[in-house]
Amino acid sequence: MRGPVVKTAAILLILGSLAGCTAAVPMQAAEDTTNPVCAEIVVRLPDDIDGHERRETDAQGTGAWGDPAVILLTCGVAVPGPSTQRCVTIDGVDWLVDDSEEGRGVFTTYGRDPAVQVVVDLVTSDSNALNALANSVGYSPVVGACTSPEDATIDDDAVLRPQP
């Protein structure tokens, strides 16, 4: 009689511990997510950003913070070319800023390969998030940098291009 009681208790213990687990954040891996630099970035991601704890994700080269997730990171996104988007430098990392979606900011590293994209739900501080990620994202090699409008020219296609 003791065997079934022990087995039942073990099953209840396992089920109880699973009920307390938070599900992995569903994310999509980027095209260049298998780039070894993405692995270097991901292993260095902070455990906490602006009071939001890091969560498990279901895709390689990604990170998420908060419950519900308010900060999402994807490594290996397409490396952006010359752009007219606002570009900011935060703690040594250049970011293209897309704030066209109300309530969230989308930030993509500029001048780094592989590129990293961070989506921040604006219930948290985007600058705190980008500052917290700078050490990790800084492992992506620099291949360019933001330029000011004064340092750029407009070519025939009306796209800003850095001057040589």
Image (tube, rainbow, N blue to C red):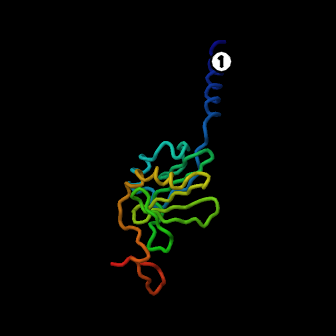
Residue 138 place in picture, x, y as percent: 39, 55
Q: Write down the quadrant of residue 151 in the picture.
A: bottom left
Residue 75 place in picture, x, y as percent: 46, 57
* Disc 1 element: helix
Residue 40 place in picture, x, y as percent: 39, 50
Q: How many marks?
A: 1
Query: At x 61% / y 44%, what residue is drawn?
Result: 67
Q: Measured along the vertical axis of the image, is residue 115 above or below residue 132? A: below
Viewer can see residue 55: no
Query: At x 54% / y 55%, what residue is drawn?
Result: 126
Viewer can see residue 91: yes
Taking the image as shown, residue 3 lies to the left or right of residue 139, namely: right
Q: Which residue is mark 1?
A: 4
Given the current orientation, which residue lies at the most extreme top position? 1
Given the current orientation, which residue lies at the most extreme left position? 164
Residue 97 place in picture, x, y as percent: 52, 65
Q: Measured along the vertical axis of the image, is residue 152 above or below residue 43? A: below
In the rendered view of the protein, which quadrant contains the N terminus? top right
In this view, the residue in front, 12 or 73, is 73
* Circle 1 Cα neighbour tier, 10 Å, few/some/many (<14 / 14–19 / ≥20): few
In this view, the residue in front, 1 or 154, is 154
Q: Amino acid at mark 1?
A: Pro
Given the current orientation, which residue lies at the most extreme front position? 150
Query: At x 35% / y 60%, what residue is drawn?
Result: 141
Taking the image as shown, residue 75 lies to the left or right of residue 3, namely: left
Taking the image as shown, residue 39 lies to the left or right of residue 11, namely: left
In the rendered view of the protein, which quadrant contains the C terminus? bottom left
Query: At x 58% / y 65%, what residue is drawn?
Result: 99
